[in-house]
Amino acid sequence: MRNSLKIAVLSVISIVAVSCKKEDKSPSYHKGDLTILTDESFKSVTEALADGYMINYPETHIKIETKKEDLGFLDLLNDKARITVMSRDLTPEEKKAYEEQVDLKFLPAKFAADAVVFVVPKDSPKQSISMDEIKNGLESDAKNFIFDGTNSSNLNFVAQKLKKQPKDLKFSIIPGSQNIIEELGKHTDKIGVIGLNTFSRPYDKTSEKLREMVKVLPVENNGKLYSVDNESLRKMTYPFTRVLYFLTNEGNFNIANGFIRYSCTQLGQMIVEKEGLQPYNIYKREVQMR
């Protein structure tokens, strides 16, 4: 009788142990490690979302790694990363490569409207810039436009907007958007090209300091001036508005997909708004009481 009882107990323990092992190996969105690749231009909003996710799920550990947009996409294709942040539209060839190599349908998870902005020193007499000036300037040997590097999201997006290849544009380089702002005063004839998220946080001390150093130029297009603000981002009327989105190669509901879902929910979108960007999935609604 005792031997039968021992055997029964051992069987139950074995079943529980096996179940626990299987459970440990199963996909989990609320615990584990994840590295997110992001271009430096939208590192701030990505970090803010990661911090929010880790507060909600303390057993998750998310690391943000800065990498140029094109290189991050290649790492995703080659299974060297599980998730990356993108801003430019992929070409048909890139979408095909994604679906073939990752074996998933191309479904970008859009979460924020950001922008590429053109800045000059605060005391510059320049008040605006036209689309023609931008196009002609990027074809000039004077190289009056300063980008944060080749393969960067800002360069890629501007080139795509102008229907050009980045290699066909002529420009100067100062690595890092913050460095562009800080050194622009030494190059008074130049125009810095940076991502809005570089200094979009309304109450952040560093952002405030950077905003005080430069003037953001409205862009003239077809005879009308467009400034960067919540309305122009929401309606995408500012010519260089861009939509940020996540891509993953994770086929199950693990931490990468959990993070993406969180970023697109109301809580994640509130974080996007606090970053000074336009949430993609929620908009403010005004109700008039009579």
Image (tube, rainbow, N blue to C red):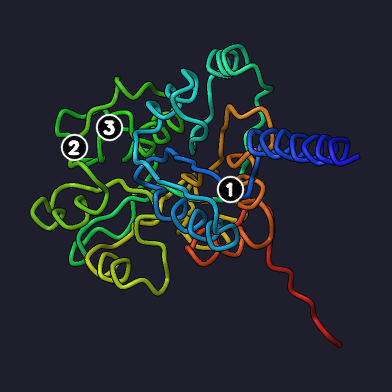
Q: Say which element carries label 3.
A: loop
Name the residue located 48 percent from the left edge and 64 percent from the top edge: 276
Q: CA distance from mark 1 to mark 2?
A: 40 Å
**Residue 31 has which mark?**
1
Q: Say which element carries label 2.
A: strand
Name the residue located 47 percent from the left edge and 58 percent from the top edge: 48
Label 3 or label 1, whichever lies nearer to me, is 1
Which comes sooner in the sequence, label 1 or label 2? Answer: 1
Say left or right for 149 vs 252.
left
Say left or right for 197 vs 241.
left
- Residue 254, how many percent across, how many down? 64, 38
Between 122 and 279, which is closer to the camera in this rendering? 279
Q: CA distance from mark 2 to mark 3?
A: 13 Å
Name the residue located 26 percent from the left edge and 40 percent from the top edge: 147
Hey, which residue is sitting farthest bottom in the picture? Answer: 290
Q: Say which element carries label 1.
A: strand
The local crowd at label 3, few if under 14, some if 14 to 19, many if 20 or more residues have their Cα within 10 Å, is many
**Residue 173 has which mark?**
2
Between 260 and 69, which is closer to the camera in this rendering? 260
Label 1 or label 2, whichever lies nearer to me, is 1
> Which residue position holds label 3?
138
Type of residue at label 3?
A: Leu
Q: CA distance from mark 3 to mark 1?
A: 47 Å
- Residue 39, how many percent across, how many down? 38, 40
The local crowd at label 2, few if under 14, some if 14 to 19, many if 20 or more residues have their Cα within 10 Å, is some
Choose top left, top right, bottom left or bottom right for residue 148. Answer: top left
Type of residue at label 1?
A: Lys
- Residue 127, how many percent across, how many down? 30, 60
Label 2 or label 3, whichever lies nearer to me, is 2
Say left or right for 281 vs 83.
right
Between 53 and 231, which is closer to the camera in this rendering? 53
Which quadrant: the C terminus? Answer: bottom right
